[in-house]
Image: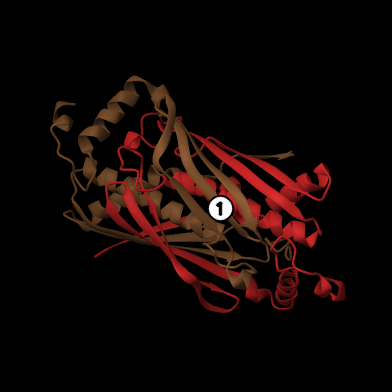
Chain colours: A brown, B red
Amino acid sequence: MTTTKTRPPLNGVDTPTLFATLDAVKANPELAKFQFRATNQWIAGTHNRSTIADFFGVGEERAHERTFVFDADHPAVLVGRDNGPTPVEFVLHALAACLTSGLANIAAARKVTLTEVRSTVSGDIDLNGILGLDPEVRNGYEGIRVVFHVDGDAQAEQLAALVEQSRNRSAVFDVVTNGTHVSVDVATA
Amino acid sequence: MTTTKTRPPLNGVDTPTLFATLDAVKANPELAKFQFRATNQWIAGTHNRSTIADFFGVGEERAHERTFVFDADHPAVLVGRDNGPTPVEFVLHALAACLTSGLANIAAARKVTLTEVRSTVSGDIDLNGILGLDPEVRNGYEGIRVVFHVDGDAQAEQLAALVEQSRNRSAVFDVVTNGTHVSVDVATA
């Protein structure tokens, strides 16, 4: 612990706080229980808008520093008006963002200075599934491919190992690859 | 087909085009093969930014009407600067948006006029997983709960059936509940 406390921030990661957070959660695992939330409002057609404002974590209700609002829609070719990306594109963004956030933290913990991290994520989907035209075709992505470009003051294999460890610890990668139980309830009023 | 062609738009859904699209895909299933994409750039710490600009679908490369850019970050309590929602919150938005888009289309196809669709999505996550502090805890959400409020010119059970059918045909619900193969490759350069 003494050595970690003397580490300066690296890669824009506040490493002392990161390690202090780990120590605090080790001492009280309940602090790690979070609940994240979004609310969504239909606008018209395939256009709708989500608001992300508050969450529960570290033992209490918390608010983001500002409220985030995102529109989703379908493009014209999918009978929408392109007022936002499609929902499935937001999944790709979430996946890239989660892997990248984790990578920066892991690099800082391993004392690797990053100079660049870029990624491209692509997902193949056959809409015969969601259109109900082919019962053999699933609704979701058939597969997703992520390609990272990472540069920093470490050997290629160490940089690749950062991506590997980030994948091993990514919440979104876990959800997208392993699935999560989702309940859907309706209140008509 | 004759009857569907005479249907007017409903709920902001261009029903004639929706049915024409279904007919076109029935005639040529290859049109339904899409590839969606996001690119992500690390900024600092847990802050990174995705760009969503183009996709492949209906037989050719296509661009959104504008380029969409989204920041993701961690809040201060998770050692970030709250420059955007967390990646896992974007997953909740994607899920709500996908279910809502589908619901509006299905309502239009069933000649139900909607007056309101709202939903709240919440996901419980124990960060002892991603922090690597408890091997028994998964990285991702333990579970996600969606609650819809739907109002329109139909009985409660018909409105509830719209949500049910949207769930049955949702790409994001499928990915999040059933999982999808994700490959992660690294190019260090």
Tally the numbered discs.
Answer: 1
Above or below, A3 against B186 in this view is above
Estimate the x, y position of residue B105 in percent, counting from the top left: 71, 60
Q: Nearer the viewer, residue A80 or B188?
A: A80
Q: Where does the image place residue B61, in percent across and percent down from the top left?
A: 51, 77
Q: Residue at x 34, y 25 (%)?
A: A25
Is residue B179 visible in this depiction of the protein? Answer: no
In the rendered view of the protein, which quadrant contains the C terminus of chain B? bottom left
State whether residue B98 is above or below residue B135: below
Q: Is residue A66 left or right of residue A17?
A: right
Q: Report the front residue among B23 and B104.
A: B104
Residue at the far top: name it: A27
**Where residue A121 appears, x then y in whole percent?**
43, 61
Residue under numbered circle 1: A49
Q: Tag 1: residue type?
A: Arg
Mark 1 secondary-structure assignment: strand
Identity of the residue furthest to the right in this view: B3
Residue farthest to the front? B115
Which percent across, then down, holds residue A132? 73, 62
- Give the residue displayed 36% in from the left and 42% down from the top: B74
Going by the image, does B98 lie left or right of A158?
A: right
Which quadrant is the N terminus of chain B positioned in?
bottom right
Whether residue A2 sits left or right of residue A168 in the image: it is left
The answer to whether residue A91 is seen in the rendering is: yes
Chain name for mark 1:
A
Label 1 neighbourhood size at 10 Å, few (<14), some (14-19), many (20+)? many
